[in-house]
Image (cartoon, rainbow, N blue to C red):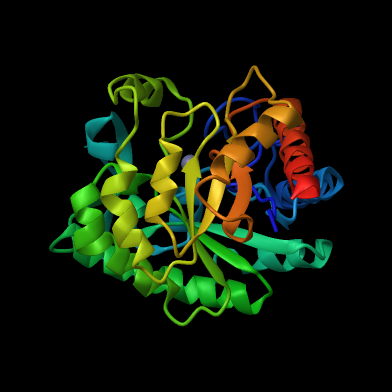
Amino acid sequence: MLETTIAGSLPKPEWLAEPEKLWAPWRLAGEELKQAKKRAAAEWLNHQQAAGIDIVTNGEQFRIHFVHGFLEHISGIDWDKKTAMGIRDNRYTVQVPTVTGPVIRPESVHLDEVRFTRAKTDRKLKFTLPGPMTICDTIADVHYDSRPEMAMAFAKILNDEARELAAAGVDVIQFDEPAFNVFMDDVKEWGIAALHRAINGLTCTTAVHICYGYGIDENLHWKETLGSEWRQYEEIFPALNASRIDQVSLECADSRVPMSRMGLLKDKGLMVGAVAVTPDKVETPEQVATTIRSALQHVDAERLFPCTNCGMVPIPYDTALGKLKSLAAGAAIVRNKL
Ligand SMILES: [Zn+2]
């Protein structure tokens, strides 16, 4: 019990991409880049195992962006036709590519990296994919009639991908849906239906990561507007609890999400963020233990998975490493006393 895991991403080493920069371009190319990604992933697997993380990931060392890393391999998207789009309900404007035809997955996107990662570790392995709603909020569209229709088209190809990855030995497939706490009505109307399409027929554990985003300026300003308690989750948690998704995440380290909201997810595993994505501060094991103990007042230990608040890609390498160690050590403190 209290199996530890991480949201997914980890910082790139400085020889692979510029550190502490979101979406930093690769420093290498061709075969050299291919080998460098593998080396970076293998190093993070070793770090996670040495720290004592139970459910590991490849740290997303094979992709630059958590959505585009998948979309780059999908046909039906025009990458030269850029459209200015106010994403996450106009929190920030980005030039995004445009869907101009039916989206098709010509071949496996992540199978090679999963085979490589699976062969490198005996631990339970998690793999993250972008969720259909978040994809639709990160790309423009001139082909489909509506966002729900496009979401279902992406959900179908995500499902094809997820089935192949599960067959290759992935234990947990997680869909990243930061858009879920922005479009709460859409989540209930079609977001969960799209997720169900994406997990259709999967026999591995399934998870959804929802969050208030990395600590970039746009997100920090947005969080300032949310008041002393962040209550967005309570609008969607009842629907998620009724869904077929196995695990749901929430941030508990340095956040204003009321922990009592876990009571709305009585039938789910909870990935409880016990370390924050902060560049300048590493939680102590005792602080992690305190967060886990607080969470245990709302969820039993069998359903609690101590986790990071969000992906750790934007913070310094050594800080992320320290946080992994504290996360595992903090969980061990609590586990030993239960
Ligand atoms: Zn996140």
x then y, percent, for residue 254? 52, 26
Q: Look at the picture and state if 336 lies above or below 329.
A: below
Whether residue 97 appears in this view of the structure is no
Q: Residue furthest bottom?
A: 201
**What residue is shown at x 31% (from left), y 58% (from top)?**
238
Whether residue 284 appears in this view of the structure is yes
Q: Look at the picture and state if 30 lies above or below 107.
A: above
Query: Can you tell which quarter of the image residue 286 is in?
Result: top right
Nearer to the camera, 119 or 328: 328
x then y, percent, for residue 22? 53, 31
x then y, percent, for residue 10? 65, 40
Look at the image and tell me in which quarter the N terminus lies: bottom right
**What residue is shown at x 55% (from left), y 31% (from top)?**
253
Q: Look at the picture and state if 310 lies above or below 161.
A: above
Nearer to the camera, 116 or 324: 324
In the visual, does 143 lie left or right of 54?
A: left
**What residue is shown at x 68% (from left), y 26% (from top)?**
283
x then y, percent, for residue 212? 40, 36
In the visual, does 313 lie left or right of 318?
A: left
